[in-house]
Amino acid sequence: MCYSIPGKVENIQKNIVTVDYFGEKKKAINEIDDLKIGDYIYAQGGYVIKNIPQEEAFSILSVWKETFFELQEVDLQLSRLEVEKKGISKNLLKILDNAVEEKKLNDEQLLYLLELENADELNILYKTANFLRHKHLGNSCCVHGILEFSNYCKRNCFYCGISNHNASIERYRMTKEEILKNAEKAVNELSFQTLVLQCGEDSGFDIDSLVDLIKEIKSRLQVLIFISVGEIGLKELELLYEAGARGLLMRFETSNSSLYQKLHPNYSLQNRISHIEKAYKLGYLVITGSLIGLPDQTDLDLLNDIKLAKSLNAEMYSFGPFIPHPFTPLKNFNSPKVTKILKVLALTRILDPQNAKILVTSAFETIEPEARKLGLMAGANSIMLNATPKEYKKHYQIYPGRVYNDIDIKEQIDGTISMLRSLGRSPTDL
């Protein structure tokens, strides 16, 4: 199964191409020198990834044509905003009516939504977010791969299981050849068009080795590369972009600078934000967000987190739950309620209805087996699958009991595709 539908190039204006997908017209940035009108291509995240032979495109499109419109119809039915208004407060209905009309909501109204507890009212909130998702982005759902190539980290973050607080963890660092081998498997065998390369802030990978690694991957594979290697430096971000990286995954964790300082002694929130801002200026696609349920975090903090992510030009929002790790200073605190996580996802959709790609994180899936369905029905439209080899994946313990640690990646893919089909979603990034 491909995680991108082939499209036909209809127009080329400098480095911007118009691509046709069963009558839908989309634009993408092109970095392929010999691309021509009439070529068939794969695109991800607004970038042309590669052109493909016409025969191969026809073969894939013939399969997709049978299901593409059927899936759209299923999604349409599931996203209809038909709600039972009996017993629902007039204030909530007015706020959600304004949201559907995409009128700006003030902080008081948004905080009111975050404080909802009634099951029927929460259901209407989720349905509103899902309606907005369908209205603007259709049934497309991004399915990206992630490769965690090292769990060494020099930082002292209070909540993270691979921080230097955890002396019990078995550390690993893949060799360059191991990384290349697993990247090739992810792209050539598993059909990922986008791959996130992630590690802790590992001093064992300096900028020269990372640049060399990305150049080598780009020379072997046609894939959109995201990096998630921590605060590597502003000049270093530029070098990695020049090497071929086109996306940055970096959460700011919390928009509350005082709370950030408590959880990250001797580190600065502003420095982290500066990295994200610099990445966007360079041309990176940005994935960012925060943790939900941190000790001393307020609903206002969460609302400010969403606003900050939007102001940082997030291509994708990543909001996941805090999960206490037994070998960190926050080991005695609790994870947030599932409803709190879903409310944040829904509000993110309401605050950025037209553009947001919203991730259902593996941390959410770890504390709630139905997280994917619940999240996707509350406005989310993105999933990330772990392509790290089993022997290493179990040691990337950012939190305990991580879901899918013992499940083969192919089994994960099959289960994901089946679940997406049941919701009428296409595993594509149009």
Image (tube, grey):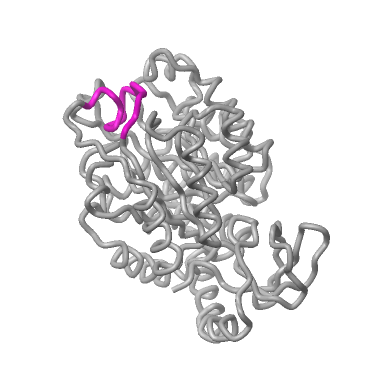
Write the residue at 50% across / 49% down: 358
Q: Please name the residue shown 63% across and 43% down the image.
A: 242
Residue 281 in sight from this viewpoint: yes
Establish if 285 lies above or below 255: below
**Quadrant of the image containing the N terminus:** bottom left
Q: Looking at the image, which residue is at 68% across and 71% down?
A: 24
Outermost right residue: 13
Res 423 → quadrant: bottom left
The quarter of the picture where the C terminus appears is: bottom right
Residue at 51% across / 38% down in the picture?
288
Can residue 14 be found in the magenta stretch?
no
Image check: 140 left or right of 37? left
Q: Is residue 164 magenta?
A: yes
Let me know if residue 85 appears in the view: no
On the picture, is 246 further left or further right than 290?
right
Q: How many labels does the image show?
A: 0
Position above or below: 375 against 236: below
Q: In this view, does 233 lie above or below 43?
A: above
Q: Residue 175: horizontal and vertical position, in percent?
A: 34, 46
In the image, the segment drawn in magenta is 152-166
Q: Where is residue 391 in the image (x, y as percent from the top left)?
A: 22, 51
Magenta stretch, overall SS = loop
* Quarter holding residue 91: top right
User: Residue 62: x percent and y percent?
Assistant: 55, 86
Front residue of 181/375: it is 181
In this rendering, the answer to whether 411 lies above or below 128 is below
